Image (cartoon, grey):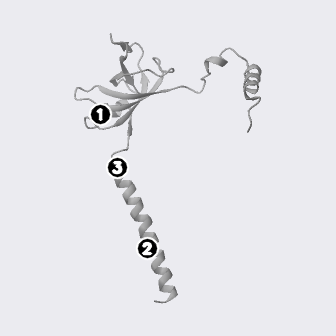
């Protein structure tokens, strides 16, 4: 076999190996994808019961209730329309989780139409300020940040 043919064969073999690895990776991850639904999308075309998805929107004001066990909460997630999806979550709530704030709930839709969340991600707006820096001016916050980094080596 000539050197030219040998190089062509190696290039084709490498290309097939790369394509094969990509197909195997895509096939193995096919069930790991979490799709993001808005409440209005979930109301119109709900996912299959038990399918892992994400639901994103705003926590409806006045809808947050805690059950007697103190760990399970129920609330409604709304979007751009009046459609609201009931959500049930058992666990520790994120610090930023409050009514009228953004939330992304990971979980699945139950047979009764309630979204059973396994994880909650609270979102904050662009005006978020950590509790430690509330009430401080820009100069005070910069000084505090500089003081906390003194002695740290890069």
Residue 25 placement (x, y as % from top left):
39, 55
Furthest residue in direction top, as rendered: 68
Q: Quadrant of the N terminus?
A: bottom left
Asked whether disc 1 touches disc 2, contact meaning CB atoms under 8 Å apart, the reply is: no
Q: CA distance from mark 3 to mark 1?
A: 24 Å
Total marks placed = 3
- Residue tagged by mark 2? 13
Label annotation for residue 30: 3
Residue in the image at 35% along x and 31% along y: 40
Label 1 secondary element = helix
Q: Nearer the viewer, mark 1 or mark 2?
A: 2
Residue in the image at 41% along x and 61% along y: 21
Determine crowd level at label 3: few under 14, some 14-19, many 20+ residues with C-alpha closer than 10 A: few
Furthest residue in direction bottom, as rendered: 2
Label 3 secondary element = loop
Identify whether 16 is placed above or below 32: below
Label annotation for residue 44: 1
Identify the mark nearer the N-term, 3 or 1.
3
Q: Nearer the viewer, mark 3 or mark 2?
A: 2
């Amino acid at each position: 076999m000539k050197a030219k043919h040998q190089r062509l064969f190696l290039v084709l073999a490498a290309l097939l190996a790369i394509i094969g690895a990509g197909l195997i990776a895509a096939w193995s991850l096919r069930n790991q994808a979490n799709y993001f639904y808005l409440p209005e999308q979930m109301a119109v075309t709900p996912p299959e019961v038990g399918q892992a998805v994400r639901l994103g929107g705003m926590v409806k004001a006045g809808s947050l209730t805690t059950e007697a066990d103190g760990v399970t909460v129920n609330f409604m997630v709304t979007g751009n329309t009046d459609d609201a999806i009931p959500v049930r979550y058992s666990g520790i709530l994120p610090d930023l989780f409050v009514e009228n704030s953004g939330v992304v709930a990971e979980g699945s839709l139950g047979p009764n139409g309630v979204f059973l969340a396994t994880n909650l991600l609270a979102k904050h707006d662009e005006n978020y300020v950590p509790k430690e820096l509330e009430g401080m001016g820009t100069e005070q916050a910069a000084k505090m940040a500089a003081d906390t980094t003194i002695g740290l080596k890069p």
